[in-house]
Amino acid sequence: MSAVIIDNQVVHYEVFGRGRPVLFLHGWLGSWRYWFPTVEVIAEHFRTYSFDFWGFGDSRRSQTRESIQAYSDQVIRFLDALGIDQVMVVGHSMGGMVALKTALSYPDRIKRVATVGAPIDGNSLSWLLKLMDQRVFANALARMPWVRRKLFHFFLGETSDPAVSEMIDDSVKSSANTLRYAVSSMWRTDLRPELPRLRVPALIIHGGRDDIVNPNQAKLFGAVPLAQVVVMPRSRHFPFLDEAGFFNDLLVHFLKAENPANLTLPTLVRKPQPLHGK
């Protein structure tokens, strides 16, 4: 376990492997542990970093209000603190929104970006997550860890994987304010107007059966030249757990490619048409 102090606040992170740096960003209700099964594979080729967003896992929040912008700033401050000039970044769900926001805002710091089940338009969140914008529901979720565990199993499906048990243990560490503010910021963020200025290669992955973030978000990238889109029809919100082998091969292929904007990806990949009127 490692920690770095950023703006007088503790940020917990983990490092594995050697080589070019890749940063993994977790989703709402999660921590760096979300990514551990994937990191074990990617660390065979790269030096991987993963940290807990402020208010989640073991990163404590003392003065920073949780938001997509604050978490994007945390990414840059983290890179500065560790002396990393450029990084490839992979983000899931909320972390994917943060990853894309950071790539749009800091293209000189982000070499490539991969998003997994990420909301681009916050309205794509399920009604279940939107409920957490209400104080009464956020407070109830924070006070009753067993409810969080049930919610986590709803997201993931029932499993006896010990790695998932550790993820669930970390999920009960966030306060009601963290849960509420993070959802509120996601819901009210819309990155669609910014997509045309994406200047770094992007891999956009969605589970075709995702019931947390609408997989129609993949269609928003039809007119984005540097974006490759993959829809994994058998996956829900966690493609890197649902179809781990395929996902890991795809991600390694993207991260290692000399020209990631012109990848030869599986036939599963399709470049969708833009949504009408968007």
Image (cartoon, rainbow, N blue to C red):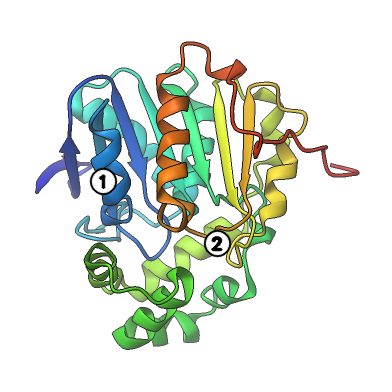
Look at discs 2 and 1 and give the one toward the viewer: 2
Q: Residue, x 28% and y 20% (percent of image)?
A: 20
Residue 110: name its quadrant. Answer: top left
Badge 2 marks a residue whose secondary structure is: loop
- Residue 272 x, y percent position in the rendering: 77, 38
Does residue 136 appear to the left or right of 26 in the view shown? Answer: right
Crowd class of label 1 (few under 14; some 14 to 19; many from 20; radius 10 Å): many
Outermost residue toward the left in this view? 1
Q: Is residue 74 depicted above or below 136 in this figure?
A: above
Instruction: Tell me: 199 left or right of 63.
Output: right
Residue denoted by label 1: 51
Residue 17: name its quadrant: top left
Q: Quadrant of residue 84?
A: top left
| Badge 2 amino acid | Arg
Q: Is residue 16 above or below residue 177?
A: above
Q: Is residue 135 visible?
A: yes
Q: Earlier in the sequence, mark 2 or mark 1?
A: 1
State the separation of the CA atoms marked 2 and 1. Answer: 24 Å
Give the residue displayed 60% in from the left and 21% down from the top: 264
Identify which amino acid the numbered label 1 is placed on.
Answer: Phe
> How far across and down, in percent of the image, does residue 180 sit?
46, 70
Which image quarter holds the C terminus?
A: top right
Within 10 Å of the Cα at label 2, are there few (<14), some (14-19), or many (20+) other Cα atoms? Answer: many
